Image: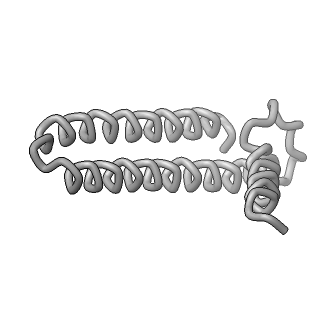
Amino acid sequence: MTLVSRFASVLFVLAAAALPAFAADPAPAPAGATASASNSGAGLGAGIGAGLAIVGAGIGIGLIGWSALSAIARQPEQKGPIQVNMIVLAALVEGAAIIALLVICYSLVGKA
């Protein structure tokens, strides 16, 4: 099995596990049931989504730092502009991760 097919299968499993977090309004719970019985997969889906957002941001910032360090090693005289671009890109990646976490939190509102 190639690396791409393994990645695709893991991504499919994680996406399937995250689907309950974005489901429509659940059916009303029976009279004696607790609130957690009506939305059994919302917390699991949100947890997986939050984990993927954080891991993706970590990988992105790691790649930015690695590329910046290799560029500075090749051209030390360009250290200033490279650092500025690195900080801007890291802020953009962190912003995307924060937006993803906000979407995940918004999907959980009213599901408890």
Drawn side of residue 79 relative to residue 6, left or right:
left
Quadrant of residue 47 within the rendered picture: bottom right
Please name the residue shown 14% across and 40% down the image: 78
Please name the residue shown 56% across and 33% down the image: 103
Please name the residue shown 13% across and 44% down the image: 79
What percent of the width, then of the height, locates residue 107? 64, 35
Quadrant of residue 92 within the rendered picture: top left
What percent of the width, then of the height, locates residue 72? 20, 51
Image quadrant occupied by the C terminus: top right
Please name the residue shown 11% across and 39% down the image: 80
Drawn side of residue 35 relative to residue 64, left or right:
right
Q: How many marks?
A: 0
Q: How is the image coloured?
A: one colour
**Which residue is situated farthest in the front direction here?**
74
Q: Nearer the viewer, residue 73 or 41?
A: 73
What percent of the width, then of the height, locates residue 62? 39, 56
What percent of the width, then of the height, locates residue 68? 28, 49
